[in-house]
Amino acid sequence: MIFSKQTLPNLLPCDGELFQIHGFYPKAEADVLFDKLYQSLEWQQEQLFIYGRWLAVPRLMCWYGDAGASYRYSHVEHSPLPWTAELLRLKTEVEVACQHRFNSVLANLYRNGQDSMGCHADDEKELGENPLIASLSFGAQRTLRFRHARLGHKLDVPLTHGDLLIMAGELQHHWKHELPKTRKSQLPRINLTFRLG
Ligand SMILES: O=C(O)CCC(=O)C(=O)O
Ligand SMILES: [Mn+2]
């Protein structure tokens, strides 16, 4: 499937582009991918230095990419792990769908409903002015919440097993996003965000 701006609605009312392809990977394929990614990626517990003390990030993470890709997290430069065959295949399929190249992927594992990601924009300089970021979700359904920085608009986007979400245009300048904790599901979820940095 080649994603086309002409056929998919922009989920945002203003100041950016957000497209969702439900079931980009159908359930049977998404089930296999979830298991492979869960078992084979090198999940790490990162620590963040906040307000003078070290805190465990509330999820597991790992980062894969081209040797030259740069990624800064919590003011620390990280080197990517080399692509696995699985991630390379997913990257290629997402590249074809988006007609856009990526050189790295950030993987997040939310172990249960208590794992989360705080409010942020993916606006690091390395990603360029208006980055196109493609995100794949596997496992438990979770809500990605967007908030407009100035206007206060709020948009909840439920992300389900096998979905592809595309953030583009000026989105990262005007909107922040977060993955709040939930009591609804205690099952794990994997998210992959493909980036060009
Ligand atoms: O888990 C998600 O859907 C969001 C991930 C995200 O925002 C990020 O990796 O920057
Ligand atoms: Mn993000």
Image: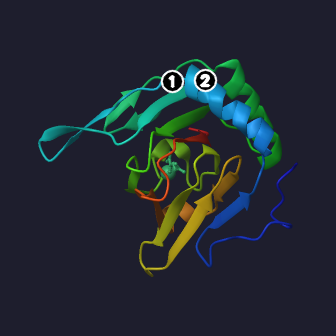
Mark 1 vs 2: CB contact within 8 A:
yes
> Is 73 in front, or is 26?
26
Label 2, secondary structure: give it: loop
Q: Is residue 179 above or below residue 192?
A: below
Q: Is mark 2 within 8 Å of ligand 1?
A: no
Could you tell me how far apart the alpha carbons at marks 1 and 2 are, in whole angstroms?
Answer: 7 Å
User: How many numbered callouts?
Assistant: 2
Residue for point 54% across, 69% down = 156
> Is residue 68 something that shows in the picture?
no
Give residue 116's position: percent from left, percent from top. 40, 50
Give residue 151's position: percent from left, percent from top. 45, 82
Give residue 175's position: percent from left, percent from top. 49, 67
> Is 142 in front, or is 150?
142
Residue 69's disc is none
Label 1, secondary structure: give it: loop
> Is 17 in front, or is 23?
23
Q: Residue at label 2?
A: 66
Task: Name the image colouring.
Answer: rainbow
Q: Is residue 117 above or below residue 34?
A: below
> Is residue 196 shown left or right of residue 62?
right
| Residue at the left extreme of this rendering | 52
- Sequence-first tag of 1 and 2: 2
Amino acid at pointer 2: Asp
| Quadrant containing the C terminus in the rendered view | top right
Q: Is residue 150 above or below residue 85?
A: below
Q: Is residue 153 above or below residue 104?
A: below
Q: Residue at label 1?
A: 80
> Is residue 119 shown left or right of residue 56?
right
Amino acid at pointer 1: Pro
Residue for point 50% across, 41% down = 126
Give residue 55's position: percent from left, percent from top. 22, 39
> Is residue 49 something that shows in the picture?
yes
